[in-house]
């Protein structure tokens, strides 16, 4: 072996070693960002749970389903079944087709309670960060990758999702991040697996798969695109038309377009008859416009330049064409379904813009955009849920002691009708039903008469409901700061 050859090999080995060190350093830093984000998300949910600001709808719903999975039973959710008049054996799959919740069952073998859901949700949202970093590094470079990762970690859709109990959306950011990043890296099988897993998250995820197909067609991968569109369409029809009904649900529960017609064909005809109105419908309410702007603004609108936005389009239209005002709002978890897609689309949109400008190698513009995206995310923090973490009043709840004492009066193993904000504190040791004006005859009731709670219309209605229960033979065994515990005689 010549000296030059030996030197070359030693140089290559040294370069590889330095690259490994550099890569290891990135792993530590990206992992640290994800860990800090997960801790913040978990803190937000756990504090709300400890201070009785979590709710039975939806934390108890998910808790009951996962607990039953953990016990190798069907995922019964009596809290929702009794609320809808469908019985104690109503299964979660009849409400939303989310068999993915079974993946959380092993964690309930470690800790059986809603705290487990909150921590798992925090970890899942944070788990998208490494894939966002990988995608952005490949497209824009290392420094923009860190900035975009932080922008996602601070993003308002994630903040709103982790602040509102636990939902199936927790699985979507990491799955969409894997799907996009792995496909972009040329690893088709992991991308396909992530896409198929999306279909196990919720009954409308087939729409996202249809969007992925549209994106692939635009990108020139026509065969895979057509197959994805067929898969997504088939999944929507199969799940909504057959699976949910087979589990005891009603497909009419998912129809949110009565202003367009009683079913899909009539709604499509209504849109075709007046295409101008159809185009304007997603912008017909101020709340819709606000939410749509907030979805694209974190990327400085550049997500609109990328075909990746097509992945999110069907799901966004599902929301904005509906007659359910809560779907339009930025206050709930719905925007977290598409947040990763739009960030990745923003990254891709910038790269496309730079190519059009013939400035693909301009690192300063890439860094400027990523910095701006991070700044936008920071400026939106005070408007949304993460803002609570640095305000001391968030950690204090004047009525928490009274609520805890009321909960302690209820024995374990019983069925209890609990006011919406108290149910999560009871669900790990009792069968929780939602307290409503219509009594279900549970042996124990925990009520709140001092402030409005869902599903009542006012605190006056809640006080009237307590009086009605006493007239039916319930005895008051505890009362403090508006909390009332009643036992059936």
Image (tube, rainbow, N blue to C red):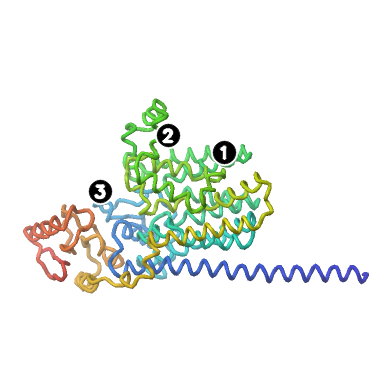
Circles 1 and 2: CB atoms closer than 8 Å: no
Q: Residues within 10 Å of mark 2 (few under 14, many from 20)?
A: few
Q: Quadrant of residue 52?
A: bottom left
- Tell me if 399 is positioned left or right of 385 in this view: left
Q: Residues within 10 Å of mark 1 (few under 14, many from 20)?
A: some
Expressed as whole percent of the image width and height from the top left, the position of residue 469 reads 10, 59
Residue 84's label in the rendered image is 3
Label 3 secondary element: loop
Point out the tag, 3 or 2, that comes first from the N-terminus. 3
Q: Quadrant of residue 386?
A: bottom left
Which residue lies at the image location 33% right of the left edge and 60% below the top edge? 59
- Tell me if 65 is positioned left or right of 301 in this view: left
Quickly name the residue at label 1: 227
Expressed as whole percent of the image width and height from the top left, the position of residue 479 reads 13, 70
Give the farthest residue toward the left.
Answer: 471
Quickly name the residue at label 2: 279
- Tell me if 353 is positioned left or right of 482 in this view: right
Circles 3 and 2: CB atoms closer than 8 Å: no
Vertical arrangement, residue 38 with respect to residue 222, above or below: below
Locate the N terminus by quadrant: bottom right
Expressed as whole percent of the image width and height from the top left, the position of residue 263 reads 35, 32
Give the alpha-carbon distance from disc 1 to disc 2, as whole Å: 27 Å
């Amino acid at each position: 072996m010549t000296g030059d050859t030996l030197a070359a090999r030693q140089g290559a080995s040294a370069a590889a070693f330095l690259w490994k060190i550099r890569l290891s350093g990135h792993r530590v830093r990206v992992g640290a960002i994800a860990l800090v984000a997960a801790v913040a998300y978990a803190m937000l949910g756990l504090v709300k749970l400890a201070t009785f600001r979590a709710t039975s709808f939806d934390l108890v719903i998910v808790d009951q389903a996962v607990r039953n999975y953990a016990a190798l039973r069907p995922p019964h959710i009596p809290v929702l079944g009794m609320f809808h008049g469908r019985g104690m054996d109503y299964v979660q799959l009849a409400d939303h087709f989310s068999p993915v919740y079974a993946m959380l069952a092993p964690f309930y073998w470690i800790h059986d309670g809603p705290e487990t859901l909150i921590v798992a949700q925090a970890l899942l949202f944070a788990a998208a960060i490494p894939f966002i970093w990988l995608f952005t590094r490949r497209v824009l470079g290392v420094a923009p990758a860190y900035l975009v990762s932080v922008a996602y970690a601070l993003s308002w859709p994630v903040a709103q999702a982790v602040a509102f109990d636990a939902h199936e959306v927790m699985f979507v950011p990491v799955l969409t991040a894997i799907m996009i990043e792995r496909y972009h890296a040329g690893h088709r099988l992991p991308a396909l697996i992530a896409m198929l897993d999306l279909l196990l998250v919720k009954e409308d995820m087939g729409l996202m798969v249809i969007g992925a197909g549209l994106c692939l067609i635009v990108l020139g991968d026509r065969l895979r695109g057509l197959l994805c569109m067929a898969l997504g369409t088939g999944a929507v029809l199969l799940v909504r038309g057959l699976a949910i009904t087979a589990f005891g649900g009603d497909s009419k529960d998912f129809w949110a377009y009565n202003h367009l017609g009683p079913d899909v064909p009539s709604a499509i005809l209504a849109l075709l008859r007046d295409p101008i109105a159809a185009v304007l419908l997603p912008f017909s309410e101020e709340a819709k416009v606000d939410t749509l702007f907030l979805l694209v603004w974190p990327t400085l609108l550049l997500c609109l330049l990328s075909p990746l936005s097509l992945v999110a389009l069907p799901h966004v239209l599902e929301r904005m064409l509906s007659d359910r005002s809560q779907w339009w709002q930025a206050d709930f978890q719905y925007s977290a379904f598409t947040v990763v897609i739009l960030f990745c689309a923003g990254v891709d949109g910038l790269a496309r813009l730079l190519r059009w400008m013939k400035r693909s190698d301009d690192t300063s513009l890439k860094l400027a955009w990523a910095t701006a995206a991070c700044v936008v995310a920071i400026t939106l923090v005070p408007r949304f849920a993460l803002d609570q973490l640095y305000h001391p009043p968030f950690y204090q709840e004047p009525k928490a002691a009274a609520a805890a004492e009321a909960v302690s009066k209820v024995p374990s193993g019983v069925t209890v009708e609990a006011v919406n904000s108290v149910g999560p504190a009871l669900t790990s040791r009792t069968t929780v039903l939602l307290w409503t004006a219509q009594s279900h005859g549970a042996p124990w009731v925990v009520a709140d008469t001092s402030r409005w709670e869902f599903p009542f219309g006012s605190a006056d209605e809640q006080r009237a409901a307590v009086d009605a229960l006493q007239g039916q033979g319930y005895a008051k065994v505890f009362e403090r700061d508006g909390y009332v515990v009643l036992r059936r005689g």
